[in-house]
Image (cartoon, helix red, strand yellow):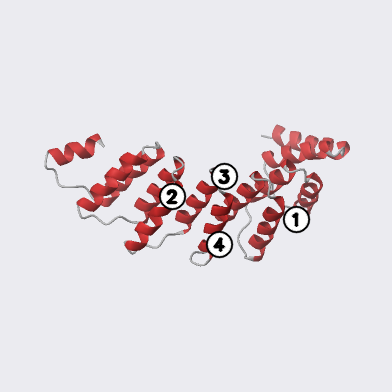
């Protein structure tokens, strides 16, 4: 803010949108979204045209401080400026809703998103993590199947969310079954997932399998 104000006071020609985007993004990351909004207003004042990065930074800032109505309002501002929200725009707000325990609002926006923008792996990871976090295991499993049927890439992060979510919601046997299927498919899983599954196996008294998996993990770690 200080640099921009000094430039204005000295009559220095306004910088381009790339500069403004950098300032707005930095302020939003720091949670100083009011200052970021002031810079955005300057962008308009100087006749610069905000782009998708400008708006997505503002959305992220408002979500970070829990001002979800204002974050959603940015979508309307984008529309009036002729800029279509992208998957990042929607992902950020959906994630914000889930982080603020507004599950129904997050799901409603997700359904709206499906009509306009193709969801990504990140989109589904956000939904799955939010549903499992809210204890909505049935809905999470249904969403996972929809993800697969839609042809969206299932990442290691997705499997981490699924397996961890199942275990946290007392669905250890289902997690173990999925884990075994992934092993048969030679899917490479990370240490976090393996630790989760070791705990799950011990939890359901499958100690020999847990010990064998622990030995495998220990051997792998020792190789590095």
Q: Is 210 rendered above or below residue 136?
A: above
14 on left or right of 89: left
Residue count near mark 1 (Cα–Cα under 10 Å), binned few <14, some 14–19, many ≥20 = few
Please name the residue shown 67% across and 42% down the image: 190
- What is the x, y in percent for residue 197? 76, 41
Residue for badge 3: 101
Distance CA(mark 3)–CA(mark 1): 36 Å
The part of the image, by quadrant, that contains residue 138 is: bottom right
Closer mark to the observer between disc 4 and disc 1: 4
Residue count near mark 3 (Cα–Cα under 10 Å), binned few <14, some 14–19, many ≥20 = some
Q: Is 102 rendered above or below residue 6?
A: below
Distance CA(mark 4)–CA(mark 2): 18 Å
Precedes in sequence: disc 4 or disc 2:
2
Residue for badge 1: 185
Question: Could you say whether the residue bearing mark 2 is in a helix, strand or loop?
Answer: helix
Precedes in sequence: disc 2 or disc 3:
2
Disc 3, disc 4: CB below 8 Å? Answer: no
Q: Nearer the viewer, residue 181 or 128?
A: 128
- What is the x, y in percent for residue 212? 83, 38
Q: Nearer the viewer, residue 108 or 113?
A: 108
- Mark sitting on residue 69: 2
Closer mark to the observer between disc 4 and disc 2: 2
Question: Could you say whether the residue bearing mark 1 is in a helix, strand or loop?
Answer: loop
Residue 120 can be seen in this image: no
Distance CA(mark 4)–CA(mark 1): 31 Å
Residue 41 can be seen in this image: yes
Question: Could you say whether the residue bearing mark 4 is in a helix, strand or loop?
Answer: helix
- What is the x, y in percent for residue 157? 62, 48
Residue for badge 4: 111
Distance CA(mark 2)–CA(mark 3): 14 Å
Please name the residue shown 64% across and 44% down the image: 133
């Amino acid at each position: 803010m200080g640099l921009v104000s000094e430039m204005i006071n000295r009559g220095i020609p306004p910088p381009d949108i790339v500069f403004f985007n950098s300032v707005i993004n930095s302020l939003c990351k720091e949670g100083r979204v009011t200052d970021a909004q002031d810079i955005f207003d300057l962008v308009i004042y100087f006749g610069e045209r905000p782009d998708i990065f400008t708006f997505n930074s503002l959305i992220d800032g408002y979500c970070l401080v829990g001002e979800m109505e204002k974050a959603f309002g940015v979508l309307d501002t984008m529309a009036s400026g002729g800029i279509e929200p992208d998957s990042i725009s929607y992902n950020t707000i959906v994630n914000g809703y889930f982080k603020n325990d507004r599950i129904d609002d997050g799901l409603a926006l997700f359904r709206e998103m499906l009509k306009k923008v193709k969801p990504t792996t990140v989109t589904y990871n956000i939904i799955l993590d939010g549903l499992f976090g809210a204890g909505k295991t049935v809905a999470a499993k249904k969403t996972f199947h929809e993800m697969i049927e839609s042809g969206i890439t299932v990442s290691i992060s997705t499997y981490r969310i699924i397996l961890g979510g199942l275990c946290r919601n007392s669905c250890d046997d289902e997690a173990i079954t999925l884990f075994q299927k992934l092993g048969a498919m030679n899917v490479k899983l990370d240490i976090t997932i393996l630790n989760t599954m070791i705990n799950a196996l011990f939890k359901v008294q499958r100690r020999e399998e847990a010990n064998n998996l622990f030995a495998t993990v220990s051997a792998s770690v020792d190789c590095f």
